[in-house]
Image (cartoon, rainbow, N blue to C red):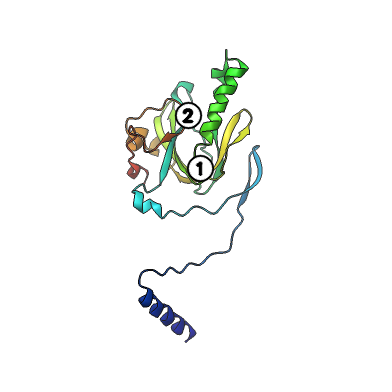
Amino acid sequence: MQVVYLTAYYCNLGRILGNHITVAFTPAFSRNSFMAKSLSPKIQLPTPMKEASLEITGNHLNIKYLKLVNHTADGRKDWSYKEYSKIGDPFYLHWAMNEDKKKGLSEEEINKILARKEKDANKAVQGDRILLCQNHYNYGHRVTHVVETVSSTAEKTDQMWTRLVRLVWVAQDPWEKYAPQTKNVIGDFVFKGGNLISANAPSIVLNLDALK
C-alpha cells in the first residue's frame, strides 16, 4: 500500500507541476582506475558527461574535432591504438613528432615544433570528442575510433604530448574490412598533419551514419 500511495503522490504532483518536474536518482560514485602502460600510475576516470545535447545538434556522437594518427608518408603497416576495443577503455592519445622529421633540425627548431604540438594537444577541453583517422599503407584511409578527452590538460612524456581519453566508438574488427573509408565519413578533406581539425570546418562534411 505504501508503494501505491507514493505513486499516487507523485502522479498528483506531476499533474500540478505539468512537465516541469524531474526526479533524479544519483547512484553511488564508482572508482574506476587502471595502470597505463609505462605512462602513468592509477588514474581515476571522472563521470561521463551528459549527452543531452546530442539530439539537439543532430551529431549523434557529438564530435568536436578530427585527428589523423597515422600518416601515409610514414608507410605505416600497423594500426594505432588497435589494442583498445572496449567502449570506455582509457588510453593516451599522442601528439608526437616523427623521428625522421627531426633529422637536420636544431634543438631550438625541434622545441618550437613540440611547443606547437603542446598547444594543439591542449586545444580540446575535457569532454570533447575526437574522431580518429588513420592512413594505412596497405588499406588506405580509414576511420577507426571516436574518443572523449578525460584529462583537462596535456602531459609531456618521452618527447611527446599526450591526453588521456576514453573510447566512445570503435570500428568493427577486422579494420581492414570494416573500418569506414575516411571519405565516406568526412568527405574529400585531406589531412596535412596530426593537429586537431574542427568538425565544423567548411571543408568537412560529416556523415556519421557510416559509423552506426
Residue drawn 41% across and 43% down?
63
Using the rendered image of the protein, determine whether residue 54 is visible from the camera's viewpoint. Answer: yes
Q: Is residue 50 above or below residue 176?
A: below
The residue positioned 46% from the left and 33% from the top of the image is: 196
Q: Looking at the picture, which amino acid does disc 1 mark?
A: Val
Please tell me whether residue 77 is drawn above or below residue 164 in the rendered image: above
Q: Which label number is shown at residue 144? A: none
Q: Residue type at mark 2?
A: Gly
* Name of the residue lying farthest toward the top: 104
Q: Label 1: how many residues lie within 10 Å, few (<14), some (14-19) or many (20+)?
A: some
Give the residue at mark 2. 194
Q: Is residue 72 above or below residue 24?
A: above
Does label 1 or label 2 sit earlier along the sequence? 1
Residue 155 horizontal/vertical position (percent): 61, 36
Locate residue 166, reporting x and y percent.
Answer: 52, 45
Q: Is residue 39 left or right of residue 188?
A: right
SS for tag 2? loop
Point out the residue furthest to the right here. 41
Image spot of residue 1 (x, y percent)? 47, 87
Residue in front for this viewpoint, 8 or 70: 8
Whole-angstrom CA distance, mark 1 to mark 2, is: 17 Å
The residue carrying mark 1 is: 125
Residue 206 horizontal/vertical position (percent):
34, 39
Q: Secondary structure at mark 1?
A: loop
